């Protein structure tokens, strides 16, 4: 896996987004280690999340490229969730998937509530998915993912997202 420590030289954006609490998150773009990096509001100290993605045995085919956040996830619309996009754009061997992780009310810790932890495999191979957004005001509420090479817009909906 290479260096087990995160640093600016071994993994950072441009997969970058802010969560509803104002934290800035970076994806470990182009790295085989799909860690996520968080900077709390007003802090320059990175917090490394190594365990949000599937376990180490399965991470060799997940390259994170982008992420989105919602504080209206789940069937009741009141759960906090992070949505991480993995893409073949970074490696042809990478699975194209959305990893969903619920967080506690303060966005501090992963939580296993109504959303929990999910891996949603997209119905494409080498479509180079590259952007993700949450359509909060549509009914049903959904995840939108764009495929660069496939020229496709994927819509994922369901009560548990």
Image: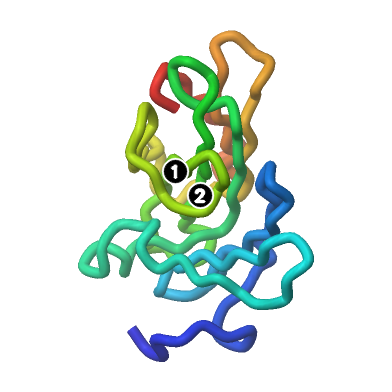
Does residue 148 appear in this view?
A: no
Q: Residue at x 60, y 50 (%)?
A: 130
Q: CA distance from mark 2 to mark 1?
A: 5 Å
| Of 103 and 127, the residue lying toward us | 103
Q: Nearer the viewer, residue 35 or 72?
A: 72
Instruction: State the quadrant of the C terminus.
Output: top left
Residue 129 vs 105, above or below: the answer is: below
Residue sitting at x 51%, y 43%: 83
User: Which residue: 46% across, 66% down?
Assistant: 49
The answer to whether residue 151 is left or right of residue 87 is right
**Dot 1, how many residues are within 10 Å of its Cα: few (below 14), some (14-19), or many (20+)?**
many
Q: Which residue is mark 2?
A: 85
Judge whether residue 134 can be spotted in this image: yes
Q: Quadrant of the N terminus?
A: bottom left
Q: Does residue 160 sit above or below 33 in this rendering?
A: above
Q: Are the residues at dot 2 and dot 1 in contact (C-beta closer than 8 Å)? A: yes
Residue at far top of view: 139
């Amino acid at each position: 896996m290479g260096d087990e420590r995160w640093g600016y030289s071994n993994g950072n954006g441009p997969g970058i987004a802010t969560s509803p609490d104002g934290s800035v998150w970076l994806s470990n773009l182009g790295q085989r280690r799909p860690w996520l990096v968080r900077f709390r509001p007003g802090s320059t100290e990175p917090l490394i999340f190594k365990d949000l993605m599937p376990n180490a045995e399965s991470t060799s085919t997940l390259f994170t490229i982008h992420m989105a956040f919602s504080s209206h996830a789940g069937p009741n619309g009141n759960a906090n969730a992070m949505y991480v996009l993995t893409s073949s754009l970074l490696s042809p061997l990478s699975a194209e998937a959305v990893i969903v992780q619920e967080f506690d009310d303060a966005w501090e810790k992963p939580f296993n509530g109504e959303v929990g932890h999910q891996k949603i495999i997209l119905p494409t191979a080498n479509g180079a998915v590259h952007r993700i957004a949450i359509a909060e005001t549509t009914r049903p509420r959904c995840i939108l993912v764009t495929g660069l090479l496939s020229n496709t817009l994927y819509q994922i909906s369901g009560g548990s997202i």
